[in-house]
Amino acid sequence: MKEKLQQIKQAALAELQAPDCDTEALRVKYLGKKGELTAVLRGMGALTPEERPVVGQMANDVRAEIEAALAERVAAAKEQALIDRLAREKLDVTMPAKCDRVGHQHPLTRAQREMEEIFIGMGFEIAEGPEVEYDYYNFQALNIPENHPARDTQDTFYITDNILLRSQTSPVQVRVMEKQSPPIRVISPGRVYRSDALDATHSPLFHQMEGLVVDKGITMSDLKGTLETFARKMFGEKTEIRFRPHHFPFTEPSAEVDVSCFVCGGKGCRVCKGEGWIEILGAGMVHPFVLSNCGIDPEVYSGFAFGMGLERVTMTRYGIDDIRLFYENDERFLKQF
């Protein structure tokens, strides 16, 4: 039996030296429940009491040597596999890295956030409302009844005779006045829709930011001061504003508001088309009829309102000459901001 144990050890160690040996198969072959070493140990019952300890110790030594040789071969195989993988997946640290592409805010979003911060700094709050609106809030409550000529310039998309896509964010002002008692000081940014043909300066979808202030003793001078502060914060401290008489059904008196060209300082250039002024918004004192419609007594309270196209402000700010660029998702354009 001693000779058999020696033969098992020598055979196992010899097979482990083979370059393509299967270590798991060898372990099962020699050390498994049905392995050769186990088979030898099962025959120990035929030995004399004197021989059993000697043969048992020898069997344990053989098992220990085979297990040590197996562990060494497994470790060597793992090390060689790592060496092969490192050689196969060699990394050239001198090559330029692939930089992650990080996005940024759209120019319209950037301009809107900046405008919101300016007005919030003056004590305004942001108010929001539905883009799918009732005809009453979009027109009638703003002193624009059915068949009023002003509806022609704000032709929008109708879902039913009474439900439409809002053509301005002014309905938000009406909803605020219905729910909130003066003093009121809000801005209402958001998307609006009009049935306009798409060209360099018109789009059926665009963005507005409107403002509303209602309180006792509000005058046109408060409106001028507010817009002057906004213009200087947005376009530069030397910016001047100019009021031109105009007509809006929901304000009286009304005005178109221009800012001095921030590029040429009013001397005339390509951006302002040689005029020295750039029109950016409309404004005026809230019409008494609108206040009454919202449950506010025009004999006690007065207010002003203004509205500007976000695209127009952004185009003016960055010298962009085509509104379509905002919506085409052209990275060559967007990367400039």
Image (tube, rainbow, N blue to C red):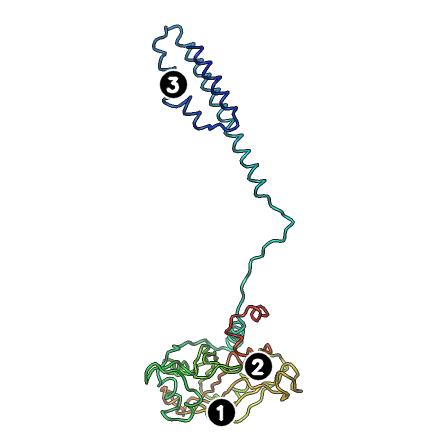
Q: Which image quadrant: the N terminus?
A: top left
32 to 89, vertically: above or below? above
Within 10 Å of disc 3 (Cα), the crowding (few <14, some 14-19, many 20+) is some
Return the x and y of residue 150 as percentages of the image width and height. 43, 91
* In the displayed structure image, the side of residue 32 where residue 79 appears, left or right: right
Return the x and y of residue 246 as percentages of the image width and height. 50, 93
Nearest the eye: 297 or 13: 13
Q: Looking at the rendering, which quadrant does residue 214 occupy? A: bottom left
The amino acid beneath tag 2 is: Ala
Residue drawn at 57 percent across, 71 percent down: 333
Mark 3–mark 1 CB contact (< 8 Å): no
Residue with the mark numbered 1: 254
Return the x and y of residue 260 as percentages of the image width and height. 61, 85
- Between the C-alphas of marks 3 and 1, the distance is 105 Å
* In the displayed structure image, the side of residue 227 where residue 33 appears, left or right: left
The amino acid beneath tag 3 is: Thr
Residue with the mark numbered 2: 231
As drawn, the label of residue 267 is none
User: Which badge, 2 or 3, comes first in the chain's sequence?
Assistant: 3
- Between the C-alphas of marks 2 and 3, the distance is 94 Å
Nearest the eye: 151 or 137: 151
Within 10 Å of disc 1 (Cα), the crowding (few <14, some 14-19, many 20+) is many
Return the x and y of residue 117 as percentages of the image width and height. 52, 74
The image shows a total of numbered marks equal to 3
Q: Which image quadrant: the C terminus?
A: bottom right
Residue with the mark numbered 3: 38
Disc 2 is placed on an element classified as helix
5 to 285, vertically: above or below? above
243 to 73, vertically: above or below? below
